[in-house]
Image (tube, grey):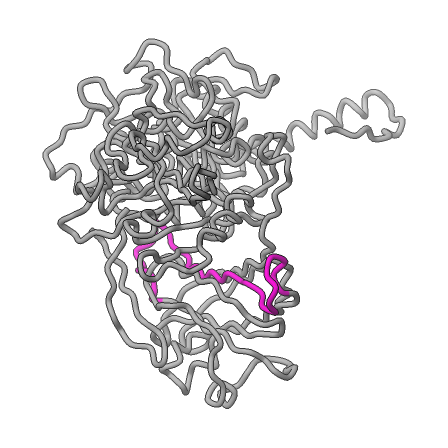
Amino acid sequence: MWAPHILQDPPVYTRQAEPEYAFGTARQRVPERPPEMAKRQNRMTARAEVRRQQQEPSVWDERSHPSNSLEESRRWYAEQIAKQMRKGGLFEDPFLPASSTSIGQGLIQSGRNYEWRRPHEIIRDPQFVTDGISRFDVVQGEIGDCWFLAAVASLSMYRDLMQQVVPFGQSFDSNRSNADGFFPYCGMFWFRFWRFGQWLDVVVDDRLPTRNGRLVFMRSTDRNEFWSALMEKAYVKLAGSYDAMRGGATSEAMEDFTGGLTEIVSLGEKTPPNLFSLMEIAQKRTSLMACAIEATADRIEAEGPHGLITGHAYSITDVRRVQTHYGQVELVRLRNPWGSEHEWNGPWGDKSSEWRNIPPDERKRMGLTFENDGEFWMSFKDFTRYFTKAEFCHLGPASGSFGSQTILEKRKRRWEMTQEEGEWVKYATAGGCRNYRDTFHINPQFRVQVIDPDETDDDNYGSIIVGLMQESRVDSNTELQTIGYAIYRLKDHREGLLGKAFFLSNNTVGSSQTFTNLREVTNRHRLPPGEYMIVPSTFEPNKQAKFILRVFSERPCPSE
């Protein structure tokens, strides 16, 4: 399994490895013209439209298609459907063929056999979605992508967010019409993911790996339902193969589903004292949440204490303060992507006697049910004791606009976001980390103003979450760079870029906890109101990469 190389920061950056976590329409006034002129104009417009469609890249030309909005994406996808219908037959994806290359070398070498089948070749009446989408729909298959399923389960709790990734109107009915908002079936399905500051349309065919007539990878609990297997395949297209899905990061998947920013919090002895309150706030803001238990290489997805699985990712589906006969208790609800197996069997588990201490009205308010569905409750104390990290994907402007879903009509306030793009260029803007004192100042620099303190705090500090993301592409052979950032306080207003002398005589007031060769490094910082300079860098000088720097804050933080 690929493991990230992580480098520690203060007081001087050093190389130190850490273990990987596996787991409407307006009318316009038209001037009067002779009828024949109007007809000619319409003919020319139609021709221009055809030329435009011919010139625009199609699903046969590119692995993914950049999108500015869901509405724009729907129009583009309708054009792809029309092209395939004119061609005839069922779509076959040239970028993810029905072959061993799409499975991946590791899985092929394991000696497993796969047969590619379309849903109508697996079952008589396939459906894209049956009875809506819920967190209980998805079941993990043969590959270790519990991290992906945990993110999917969290996403499925919010219909409007889900419909940005899994757009409605898709089915296995070839008689459907675009006129009513649906797409006719032609072997083509469409999903959307956010990557490096941009929403992407990803289209796949519906040929799926099977064995003995059954799906072998991610699937729905209902055998007639195929949205989940096709969604996984679309994500596989970005990853390169099914094998490449093993051992990923839930934090990255949640960001790819929302365009949000994921904060990773260490648990155990490192648990922040206000973590439960932060989780309550995150839930109110519709943040996606997940957690995992760290494991060594030989203990990946192995049985752990009280039915928990080590090296495995779980969705966090609820956070509550519950009133019992003996006082208030803090509870967390989790879900295992494996479904019915391996639930927590300790205190507050499904069969726990602790539930007798909950008044009937409280149990009704919680909607409490005990089923063999992989979902369970546990105390916050045990949660922080047995789990080693929690991940919160906070939503920002890139997460789109919500519709009329009841839970979202409350207009839960999202984080404010500041985003800047940059690039480390060899011998120009790639100065390396602070260990390299002669060149550190040539790195890109970004000013940020922390204006007001947090509305929930009494002290004079504001919280910001900084995320530094480097570009990563499946069609590129370049390796991820080892990246991090430093934050400096500007006590007096300074124009322009800061020079070498400033960095030699001033200390940081914050930094990334580590320098690592992951896609993104993220940290939360509590700072007094004022002006700050954020300096992103690679660990060593002259390492090239493009990046985006995002700052999430309670209140707007202007930058330049």
Q: Quadrant of residue 155?
A: top left
Does residue 215 lie above or below 535 as drawn?
A: above
The answer to whether residue 474 is magenta is yes
User: Extreme top residue here?
Assistant: 124
Residue at 34%, 32% in the rendered image: 375
Magenta span: chief secondary structure: loop
Residue sitting at the far right: 32
Q: Quadrant of residue 272?
A: bottom left
In screen coordinates, is 83 left or right of 267?
right
Q: Residue 447 location, x and y as percent?
A: 59, 72
| In this rendering, position of residue 189 left or right of residue 42 | left
Residue 30 appears at what percent x and percent y? 85, 29
515 lies above or below 218? below
The residue most toward the front is: 326
- Residue 18, located in which quarter of the rendered image? bottom left
Total labels: the figure holds 0
Q: Which residues are magenta?
A: 453-482
Q: Is residue 94 visible?
A: no
